[in-house]
Image (cartoon, coloured by chain):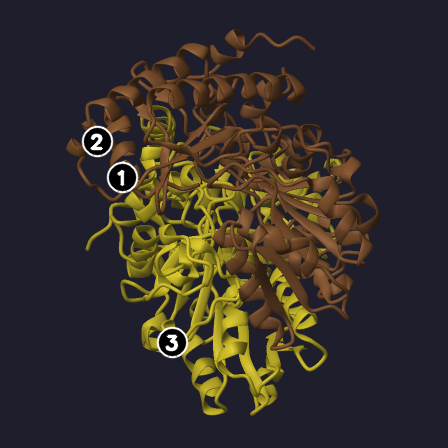
Chain colours: A brown, B yellow
Amino acid sequence: MTVDFAATRALFDLPQDVIYLDGNSLGPLPRATAKRLADCVQSEWGQMLVTGWNKAGWMAQPNLLGDRIARLIGAEAGTVMVGDTLSIKVYQALASGLDLLPKRRIILSNDANFPSDLYIAQGLCNSLGPDYQLKIVENGAIEDALDETTALLMLTEVDYRTGAKFDMGALTKKAHQVGALTLWDLAHSAGAIPVHLSQTKADFAVGCTYKYLNSGPGGPAFIYAAPHLIDKLRPALAGWLGHADPFNFSQTYEPKKGIARMRIGTPPVLQMAALETALDIWDLVDMEDVRRASIHLSTRFIAAVEASCPSLSLASPRDAERRGSQVSFSHLEGFAIMQALIARGVIGDFRAPNLIRFGFAPLYNTEDDIDSAARILAEIMRDDLWKEATYQTRAAVT
Amino acid sequence: MTVDFAATRALFDLPQDVIYLDGNSLGPLPRATAKRLADCVQSEWGQMLVTGWNKAGWMAQPNLLGDRIARLIGAEAGTVMVGDTLSIKVYQALASGLDLLPKRRIILSNDANFPSDLYIAQGLCNSLGPDYQLKIVENGAIEDALDETTALLMLTEVDYRTGAKFDMGALTKKAHQVGALTLWDLAHSAGAIPVHLSQTKADFAVGCTYKYLNSGPGGPAFIYAAPHLIDKLRPALAGWLGHADPFNFSQTYEPKKGIARMRIGTPPVLQMAALETALDIWDLVDMEDVRRASIHLSTRFIAAVEASCPSLSLASPRDAERRGSQVSFSHLEGFAIMQALIARGVIGDFRAPNLIRFGFAPLYNTEDDIDSAARILAEIMRDDLWKEATYQTRAAVT
């Protein structure tokens, strides 16, 4: 497949005066989304009312959207389900994984993991009792910490701050050697880099759709389980839409066959319509092409920034193969620098304590964007323009 | 407050040829919603991009919407939080409740409760271990089943099939007498009847917004906790947006003060915008006025149907004070009868094995609607028109 990224860029409704390098936090609006949502509201909800669950296909959407995401993350059809939030999907995977290995009580993770994943594991362990423990180690200590007590190794494939990428295949193999399962958070992977869930034999994966996949603020999450595990999973969050026969209204939970047992409650129809429209763009591209273009953009940005901003230190791996689709630089005044960038129309984000972070999305970011962003950053650093930046608190959602 | 229900009806975009008596499953579209969503998509997401979390106020919405729902359910400001699905909110309440009473292991519920509530309790008990048990009894046996082993009494205030209404105050008092907590599911109460959470001293409540509250398909749920309990709750679903300082990205979970600890992940911004618009209508009315009008409509419907359809048996309490805002009739051919009604533009729904169910929402249902629906039902029964109804499977979401 040859991708015309000029054509995909035209499918997004980007503000004129903005260079958007924060699609790793919230992806921009596809042009087709407004009309799709208007149709969903007026023609489906408004006209079909409750019959929309079948007539408009709302009820089937979590499965259908899951299958479309599956292609982007190297998963087979029937292994991915859409719904809820990433935190909920982490909980489902961890609870099911612990249940599969009842003699093991340790969830192993790294100290650089996204905090919500750690919190969810802590909350689950607290509920299950004092035997259960979240063990947090440094990246370099992960392999040594894996042992026969480890139930799950939970890692985010691409570090949300530095963009450093774990070797999913190698770590999954190490985990399997001690009999542990793996849970991969793809928050900064799905739509950012090619993911090979099936090939790497990952056991569980979860991800969100509002970053690189462009489903909009609060878009639903997804969960993956390896085919050989799916029908063994006992859902901890045993909701009626994961029941074998939900409209029979029986009193006893019995999970559906297949990944649909990971459904819980009523799915968010409006958010799913927005996701559906975003995936229409993804259907046009191949992740290998996206990756090639992303590496080209991020490498170009690093070279330009390093040539003109000696006070900024690269916080991401220099080797493009070892990073995702984002690049971070550290500087003590990172917060003010990012404010100055945003004031000049370059939107990236800041991550405490000192990182400015830029995401690269070839679907809509061009070489010109990257060159302009690097030039504006150079001006800010050369003339100390960040000193003027107002110190506003800005809470961006990763 | 005097309510002009003709004025509120004009605020809904109802199809011309439909009499909609299924707002207890999915409420209809408010006229203002399409424009609000278009603004949310184009002006907020499209133009503000990631800065919308603060600039457009997305991040604060779960609290603000919760406070607006609080008024409708007799709760104080600061006790209701919006998000996720009803099943997730049931899980949060049950897990927190069990954690508050660690020596008690029984969740008590009734066999007529909505199955997803029972499933969620079963899934939680399975996770927690063999000591934990969901005990399901008949309605008449609830009070006797309450004892010192009961951690939580979990009931849906208004029965989803019959519309029968529990006495929240009396049962909460009984539960408290044995030291148990109560969890009330308000799925068929919020926007249907006046609810008095604070006055009845209910401990937890949960509900959905896509039925009587008209937030649209898949609209977010809500959770309530009594003020004296809130800061004692240890969230089992410990997500980062319930953290005391989420953007500090610390490794250890520490719950926020207040009901915001019941937040989990990124909230569904599009669905919240739809809820916000729906609540603009609710801000115009008082639940006591809604209740009076609802009783008038349901009583009129029962009288008309009983006068003309002797083969239909009333399955709801005859005493209006003992039912919610819905009425069901039983008939062996209930499924076909409902199909015949829908084919003639009267939308109610069917609940296995033999109930036809009608919801009454004075915000948009008029006396004329009720009279016409009863007349059409009478024609169907008199002329056996249901025999022509196609037996299509129809999955409606309660």
Residue in the picture at 45% in, 81% down: B172
Residue in the picture at 74% in, 43% down: A170
C-alpha distance separating marks 2 and 3: 46 Å
Q: Position of residue A326 (x, y in %)?
A: 49, 30
Query: Callout 2: helix, strand or loop?
Result: helix
Q: Looking at the picture, tell me which residue is in the foreground, A51 or B323.
A: A51
The reply, left or right, for residue B43 in relation to residue A383 is right
Subunit of label 1:
A
Amino acid type, callout 1: Glu
Tell me, for residue A333, which label it has, or none: 1
Does label 1 or label 2 sit earlier along the sequence?
1
Quarter of the picture containing the N terminus of chain B is bottom left
Q: Tell me if mark 3 has few (under 14), some (14-19) or many (20+) residues whose alpha carbon lies within 10 angstroms of its own.
A: some
Q: Are marks 1 and 2 in contact (CB under 8 Å)?
A: yes
Q: Residue furthest right?
A: A228
Tell me, for residue B227, which label it has, or none: none
Tag 3 residue: B229
Position of A6 relative to B292 (above/below): above
Tag 2 residue: A386
Q: Position of residue B362 (x, y in %)?
A: 37, 49
Q: Position of residue B37 (x, y in %)?
A: 38, 31
Q: Tell me if mark 1 has few (under 14), some (14-19) or many (20+) residues whose alpha carbon lies within 10 angstroms of its own.
A: some
Task: Please say whether residue B194 is visible from this viewpoint.
Answer: no
C-alpha distance separating marks 3 and 1: 42 Å
